[in-house]
Amino acid sequence: MRIGVHRLAMAHPGDVRGLRALVDSGALDPAAIVATIGKTEGNGGANDFTRAFATTSLAQYLSSVRKQTPEEVEQQIAFVWSGGCEGVLSPHVTVFTRDDAPGTAPEGDKRLALSVQRTRDFRPEEVGRTPEVEEVAAAVRRALADLGCDVEDVHYVQVKGPLLTPAGIADAHARGATVVTTDPNRSKAYARGATALGVALALGEVAAAAVTDEVIATDLTLYSNVASTSAGGELTSCEVIVFANSARATSPFRIGHAALADAIDLAGVRAALRAAGLEFDCEPGDPERERIAAVFAKAEAPVGGLLRGQRTTMLSDADINYERHSRAAVGAIIASQTGDARIFVSGGTEHQTPPGQAPIAAIVAV
């Protein structure tokens, strides 16, 4: 297996020029694309339609070069978008290709591998509850079987799933079903939490008996160290992308992960880069930065609003949601090390690392 990683700038959510240039030059085979992960300048909320627009734009372009319908493209490629490019974060998309030609990494080495899996569609009353947990866990297990790797080789699991929309809530109520919340924006926390617990369950990080509807987005002592989950109104199923290092991969990349202790944890950023194989002393220089292919992180407000003992306004600001504050802060810290603002930072860390922390993963060229 050989994985390709292409990080492309976007001038707007419908911009496919960077992708088209790679395809036209022959540097990228569109038939080999299996996933994209990107940031749009939408608000990241329940009404962020830039994510759906970006998916539609890429799917329509790829349908022309893959000789498929846009619907077939969306069925075969995982399109994961996170809205919100606050602060220095730059709108972009990272395109992943996969070539399944047999091969092995150099002796004693493991290289980047990935597997894309999907769950079934969920009814509104299942979003943010144990059926979603169980379906995501099953998808992660399928990915592990596909990759043939050990649990400890998994460094990042990106899950994008549905949140509750007004239409979905109304549909559930019309059938006499109850939903986890009637607030679409609040449903993001339950949806992110359920999918993160699904990752934790599959990787043996939590026990099945501990996972109930009541603990989702409530008992944050249950968590995964490698899950990164998002929710959007553009989906009805979950797209699950498992990234690992495998001895069966010949990719020119490795992936590593760490945890950010808080929104200004520079040491955590450096730990993720080093875990992926980047060697440097104090901080990466230009030669090391050129090897950084992608960085993915989550962002969260500090517990109680206190950052290392000092008050912040993240949780009390009535004008700006805390996720937007935290994404801006974390994005700046990461970009200060990578020298590149095309960083994927998503808000909300329910069941993703211990409370107050946030996951970060980096892909580095060997």
Image (cartoon, rainbow, N blue to C red):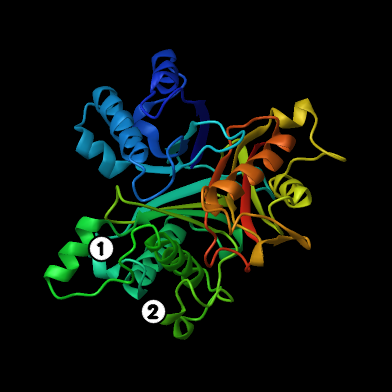
Which residue is found at the position 32% from the left and 66% from the top? 127
Amino acid at circle 1: Phe
Q: Which percent across, then down, holds residue 42?
A: 42, 38
Contact, mark 2 vs mark 1 (Cβ under 8 Å): no
Q: Secondary structure at mark 2?
A: helix
Q: Secondary structure at mark 1?
A: loop
**Location of the C terminus (image quadrant):** top right
Q: Nearer the viewer, residue 205 or 31?
A: 205
Q: On the picture, is 267 further left or further right than 168?
A: right
Task: Find residue 64 and name its label.
Answer: none
Sooner in the amino-acid sequence: mark 2 or mark 1 = 1
Mark 2 = which residue?
213
157 versus 269 height, above or below: below
Mark 1 = which residue?
122
Mark 1 surroundings within 10 Å by alpha-carbon count, few (fewer than 14), some (14 through 19), many (20 or more): some
Which residue is found at the position 24% from the left and 57% from the top? 166
Q: Which percent across, then down, holds residue 277?
A: 72, 44
Q: Which percent across, then down, holds residue 36?
A: 42, 38
Amino acid at circle 2: Asp
In this view of the protein, can residue 249 be seen by the observer?
A: no
Q: Which percent across, then down, holds residue 65?
A: 28, 22
Which residue is found at the position 36% from the left and 43% from the top? 48
